[in-house]
Amino acid sequence: MNNGMKSEVVVITGASAGVGRATAQAFARQGAMVGLIARGREGLEGARKDVESLGGKGLALPADVARYDEVESAAAAVEKEFGPIDIWVNNAMTTVFSPFREIKPEEYKRATEVTYLGAVYGTMAALKNMLPRNQGCIVQVGSALAYRSIPLQAPYCGAKHAIRGFTDSLRSELLHDQSGIHLTMVHMPALNTPQFNWCKTRLPRHPKPVPPIFQPEVAAEAIVWAAHHRRREVYVGRSTVKAIWGNKVAPGILDRYLAATGYDAQQTREPVSADRPSNLFEPLPGDPGAHGIFDAEAADRSIQFWETSHRPWTALAGVGLAAMACFAYWKRIR
């Protein structure tokens, strides 16, 4: 809860499921007023109920983030209902699991419009409201795949790379203008979200995240933390750190490694159902919640992120270990 302080006003895109749903829950536990943007009305209503049951206030806003006018209208509705927006989280995404050669142009366009332009339009709408007040925070939900692409996910990898490039450009502009608005990007590991059940796929077997897998609450914790700390970027999960730095050091080796392993690593042993639904062009009915089908494999915490978010304690522990090592060495040579 906010202990008597003014409740934060937060907007989250892609709020009906997965990371967006878990993030709405996390902000609600702090007493926030949350504008929830997504296409699926049943999922939005479920998210609103979550927020209000956890101590926040929710406003369901059906909108397609690929249409700027709808995003702008949603932002105006939040400000009218709750007041000035403090935090905006760009999280909405969709994709196509497929070899690139099998993706249709309209499918690639749609995935790019939602995942990339959705973040651009969300940022535009947020800045329209934040710039006159010269305050606020915009969080872009990124991925290890914003640095290191993998096969079978060209639309998603391309969009996440594009978001990072766009964000870096805008950040420099805000710094030039000495703006009080903070812009940050949180790069995620593989997550157990419903997207693997409903994104368009042409794979022979059911799509899955590449292990290690984390629960969406791990991502939500990082997003909430990033919204309140002025970090340029935040990495979540040691696998994310390894992917990003590995690509800087040996990208060619990773190309070949992923060519050999990346297909099987992204598929279960179960065949794809002939009647599998897809949310690429239209939302699916029902309330999917935050979690996907990989609960048994997903970790509910990240030691790496704890170290990132507790740097003073991590540094103190490092100093303590170094002192102990020096003392042990001194005793040995005595």
Image: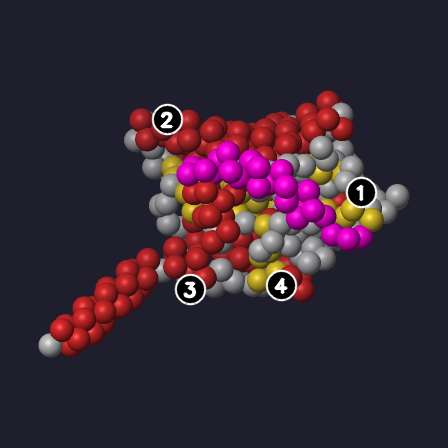
- Describe the element under mark 2 as helix, strand or loop: helix
The answer to if 265 sits in the magenta stretch is yes
Crowding at mark 1 (Cα within 10 Å: few <14, some 14-19, many 20+): some
Furthest residue toward right: 274
Question: What residue is pinned by disc 3?
Answer: 3
Amino acid type indicated by mark 2 = Glu
Within 10 angstroms of label 4, few (less than 14), some, or many (20 or more) residues?
A: some
User: Considering the numbered disc 1 on the image, is that residue within a helix, a strand or a loop?
Assistant: loop
Q: Confirm or deny contact between disc 3 and disc 1 (CB under 8 A).
A: no
Q: Nearer the viewer, mark 4 or mark 1?
A: 1
Q: Please tell me which residue lies in front, 26 or 126.
A: 26
In the image, which disc is placed on residue 53?
4
Q: Amino acid at mark 3?
A: Asn
Please name the residue that numbered disc 2 is placed on: 173
The answer, for residue 298, to whether it is visible in the render is yes
Secondary structure mostly seen in magenta is helix
Residue found 62% across the figure and 63% down from its top:
53
User: Which of disc 1 and disc 2 is earlier in sequence?
Assistant: 2
Residue 104 badge: none
Name the residue carrying label 1: 204
Q: CA distance from mark 4 to mark 1?
A: 40 Å
Whether tag 4 and tag 1 are in contact, CB under 8 A, the answer is: no
Above or below: residue 312 compared with residue 256: below
Front label number (2 vs 1): 1
**Residue at the far top in the pictured view:** 105
Q: CA distance from mark 2 to mark 3?
A: 35 Å
Q: Earlier in the sequence, mark 2 or mark 3?
A: 3
Real-space CA distance between mark 3 and mark 1, rounded to the nearest whole angstrom: 52 Å
